[in-house]
Image (cartoon, coloured by chain):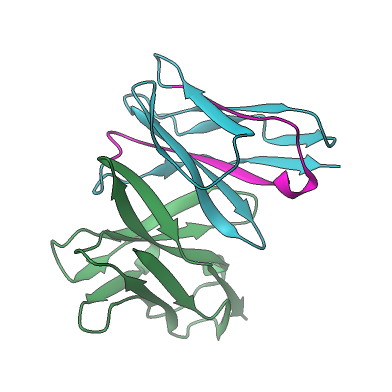
Chain colours: A green, B cyan
Amino acid sequence: AQSVTQLGSHVSVSEGALVLLRCNYSSSVPPYLFWYVQYPNQGLQLLLKYTSAATLVKGINGFEAEFKKSETSFHLTKPSAHMSDAAEYFCAVTIIIQGAQKLVFGQGTRLTINP
Amino acid sequence: KAGVTQTPRYLIKTRGQQVTLSCSPISGHRSVSWYQQTPGQGLQFLFEYFSETQRNKGNFPGRFSGRQFSNSRSEMNVSTLELGDSALYLCASSFTGTSYNEQFFGPGTRLTVL
């Protein structure tokens, strides 16, 4: 069964430092993978998605993720953290049942940015 | 283009009551999915509707039900509320609900059961 595991429920970095949020997936078929961000009291916003077109995916707000099949990983990175990046981040994989999409989410990683 | 809207944004109910939450998808989107978000269980899939038909259902008790109207708006109903139903309920819409279609999320309805 398809699933995702996010390593680290909390990550703290200094402003200007590299952000690395880890996600490993389990899938018996080529997956569609997503990273979403959730700011306090808001819904989820898509950061980027992998749909097999390119292994390095660029998203919004300077984030990018690299799909590595050999490592079954889809880690999210940003070269330089900004205070506004403080939020919760979710990795998700698509499951298709009877032609319909269902997103399976990881447990989330709360990112804190230290000034 | 207006985003996904959910009403109400906040709701307080007592155990045993029932509640109906509403979701209006992005114009042109025909697929609506519902998710429950709690600190303990994270984000869990409830069900998905497409063209007024439920295509997919998560592992929730029958107290959780939903429907979709011809204009793609969707409602979710929870009967006989329990304390554990307190959560943020998120609605997401997409064009067709297929794997490569991005799901756009609404701001959620925060339900508190006392």
Which span is picked out in magenta?
A: B73-97
Q: Quadrant of the C terminus of chain A?
A: bottom right
Q: Nearer the viewer, residue A16 or B56?
A: B56
- Residue at (61%, 60%) from the top-left corner? B41
Q: Nearer the viewer, residue A76 or A104?
A: A104
Furthest toward the top, the residue is B70
Locate residue A113: give its quadrant.
bottom right
Locate residue A58: give its quadrant.
bottom left
- Measured as percent of width and height from the top left, residue A4 is found at 40, 69
Lateral position of residue A78 relative to residue B6, left or right:
left
Locate residue A88: give its quadrant.
bottom right
- Measured as percent of width and height from the top left, residue A6 is found at 46, 75
In the rendered view, tell whether residue A78 sits above or below residue B30. Answer: below
Q: Is residue B51 visible?
A: yes
Lateral position of residue A35 relative to residue B101, left or right:
right
- Residue at (14%, 66%) from the top-left corner? A54
Residue A54 included in the magenta stretch of the image:
no
Q: Quadrant of the N terminus of chain A?
A: bottom left
Furthest toward the front, the residue is B62
In the rendered view, tell whether residue B38 sits above or below residue B5. Answer: below
In the rendered view, tell whether residue B48 sits above or below residue A17. Answer: above
- Residue at (59%, 35%) from the top-left corner? B62
Residue B74 included in the magenta stretch of the image:
yes
